[in-house]
Amino acid sequence: MADYSEYSDVELYHKFHKSHVFKPEAAEYVKRSIRKLFGKKKITALEIGAGTGHHTKRISELKNVCILATEPDPKYFAKLTEYLKGRKNVKFLKGRAESLVMKRKFDIVLSFDSHHHIPFKNRKKYLSNIRKLLKTGGKYIIEDEIISDYKNNSQRINGLKKLHNFVIADSERKGNKALVYLERIYLKKAIAQQGEYKTSCKKLEKELSENGFKIDKKKHIGPAGKDWGVFVYVTEPI
């Protein structure tokens, strides 16, 4: 599996991706969900594919949550550790989610825009490992970009274009040329299924069910009135 930095410049991503439409709102929803689930109880969280740490930083504002942030890409991992150096409730580990082997288990596994980077052929192995990493009663929380449901490749590509072109238009309105540039690359990669494996709600939910996860909550962050966009799922192993 290719490293993300091979097509997504680390510095551009870090500087401009934090303003990606609906992502700050999604992170706030995840924070509220964690508060509702655990209150002020001390808990542990494993973050899968933390990137350069924007979402990690937001979740680390919950001082009762101790986060182990993982990232497989060497360049992104270096930026992650530099950005969040000194955060007392954040530790770091370089590694891929499918192959993480740990003795400890976690109250939460977090995936901010990471689930769609796992190739479809590896999803069963990936979700099996997530199950092993969770404590009894633990939650797997997914924030991700979702496309409309599709029956063939042409419909899949149209769904990808709707999603990415929406983000591109929003970024153009904000004058965020760097994110426009990145999103056009992501669209090309998603169409070719090279590092980007976005899917629909229906197919994601089927995948979770078939691999032994039930959905506790599903939240559509935006855009309103669409079956695509940014979603948050709170799930747990059955």
Image (tube, grey):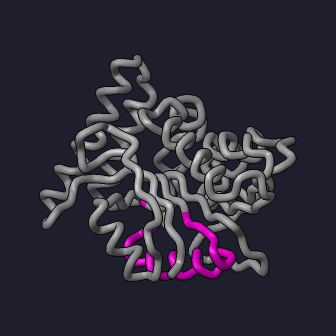
Left or right, 211 with respect to 204, comes to right
The image quadrant of residue 165 is top left
Q: Nearer the viewer, residue 217 or 128?
A: 217
Residue 135 spot, x, y in % from top left? 69, 76
Magenta span main SS: helix
Q: How many marks?
A: 0
In the rendered image of this protein, does residue 74 appear above or below residue 174?
below
Q: Nearer the viewer, residue 181 or 97?
A: 97
Q: Is residue 51 magenta?
A: no
In the rendered image of this protein, does residue 160 appear above or below residue 25?
below
In the rendered image of this protein, does residue 221 appear above or below residue 12?
below
Q: Is residue 130 magenta?
A: yes
Q: Residue at x 56, y 66 (%)?
A: 140
Q: Residue at x 79, y 46 (%)?
A: 63
The image quadrant of residue 200 is bottom left
Residue 68 spot, x, y in % from top left? 74, 59
Q: Residue at x 80, y 58 (%)?
A: 42
Left or right, 229 with respect to 127, comes to left
Q: Which residues are magenta?
A: 116-140
Residue 137 spot, x, y in % from top left? 63, 74
Residue 175 spot, x, y in % from top left? 40, 17
Q: Residue at x 42, y 33 (%)?
A: 21
